[in-house]
Amino acid sequence: MRVGTFVLAAQFPGQGQGEALHRAVRSAEVAEEAGLESVWLAEHHFVPYGTCPSAITLAALLLGRTQTLRVGTAVSVLPTTHPVALGEQAALLHLTSGGRFSLGVGRGGPWVDLEVFGAGLKAYEEGFPESLDLLLRWLREAHVASEGDRFAFREVPVVPRPAEAIGATDPAGPEVVVACTSPKSVRLAAERGLPMLLGMHCGDKDKAEMVALWRRCAREAGRPAEEILSAPHVSAGVAQIGDGRAEAAETLLKAMPGWLKQGLDAHVTVDGRVRAMRDPRAYTELLCGLHPVGTPQLCADRLAATSERTGITRFALLVEGSGDLAATEENVRRLGAEVLPQLG
């Protein structure tokens, strides 16, 4: 079982954006010290829900500051970026980090980001498969041309090529993971043999059903049996370690609703459509019930149960739910010192 952190660089009420980003960086540094396997970085624009606008840029910083930690994006939003530009950056990080970079990609949402970056709503609603396939070709081939609806260009050489990595655990290129929230996105990932990143709003039952659907779609697409059974899907969640469950949950219930309300309310749709946002306290309570929130023993048992029910062995856990730097560092250290040893 591989346990890592999920970092949003969340801006809690009363905090500055620099404070949120400093806590994000420190939590990753402490994660390596605590023996965690990875850190996954979220990307958001124009909202205090997350103050990191470029997950791959922050990944570059953290790869330079760490030695063993795997750093991934969760996710880089494909509709608002050129897949070749993202592929070049991913290849660069793969080559210079010894293969410690994972590229998580997703569709994002119908937000005003699409207007600001000139992508348009069509890029979100219809363009994700084209972008994903162009990205994959860039990471796997020596020369690439495109004749797609959105991207059309003559053949150009891929520089630098991920296959030129020296000493990487996977010389073929960086791992690519797809954020999946619907049967359509599950099928898209499965047909390409790409592991899924499943959101923290989903419980074990939903995640198990998505894994089963992924396997079925992968089989139908002719993917190798070994690849299907060993696909390293990632489960996002929340982790808060305390001396009792009530104490741990109270830490989150005091801080997270204010952050969620401030952050989620700030989202603006590109076309004026109404998007119903979750009730912040009810959502926090849901997360406390779904994920490892409580004593170290409870948290270890919860992770083990999720793994057994879903077949997922990789976790990206939100550890900054207290909103406090010192409390976040302590939470990460306890996760490494008191929970990981119980997982074997």
Image: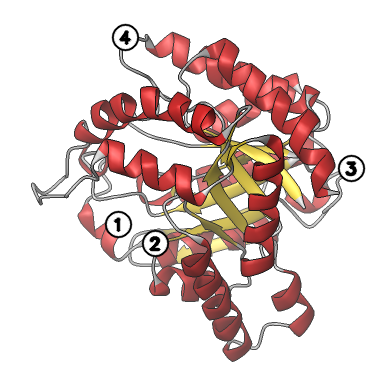
Q: Residue at x 46, y 68 (%)?
A: 206
Dot 4 or dot 2: first in sequence order is 4
**Local crowd at mark 3 within 10 Å, few (<14), some, or many (≥20)?**
some
Dot 3 or dot 4: first in sequence order is 4
Disc number lying in front (4 or 2): 4
Q: Residue at x 48, y 22 (%)?
A: 322
Q: Which residue is mark 4?
A: 14
Determine the secondary structure under disc 3: loop
Q: Nearer the viewer, residue 132 or 11?
A: 11
Q: Nearer the viewer, residue 189 or 292?
A: 292
Q: As displayed, is residue 141 above or below residue 47?
A: below
Determine the secondary structure under disc 1: helix
Q: Nearer the viewer, residue 245 or 4?
A: 245
Q: As displayed, is residue 9 above or below residue 26?
A: below
- Residues under numbered marks 4 and 2 in contact, where contact means CB atoms less than 8 Å apart: no
Q: How many marks?
A: 4
Dot 3 or dot 1: first in sequence order is 1
Q: Residue at x 8, y 47 (%)?
A: 272
Dot 3 or dot 2: first in sequence order is 2
Q: Residue at x 72, y 23 (%)?
A: 333
Q: CA distance from mark 1 to mark 2?
A: 7 Å
Q: Which residue is mark 3?
A: 166
Q: As displayed, is residue 155 above or below residue 164?
A: below
Residue 286 position within the rendered picture, expressed as x and y whole percent measured from the top left = 39, 47
Q: Which amino acid, by three-letter code, is at mark 1?
A: Ala
Dot 4 or dot 1: first in sequence order is 4
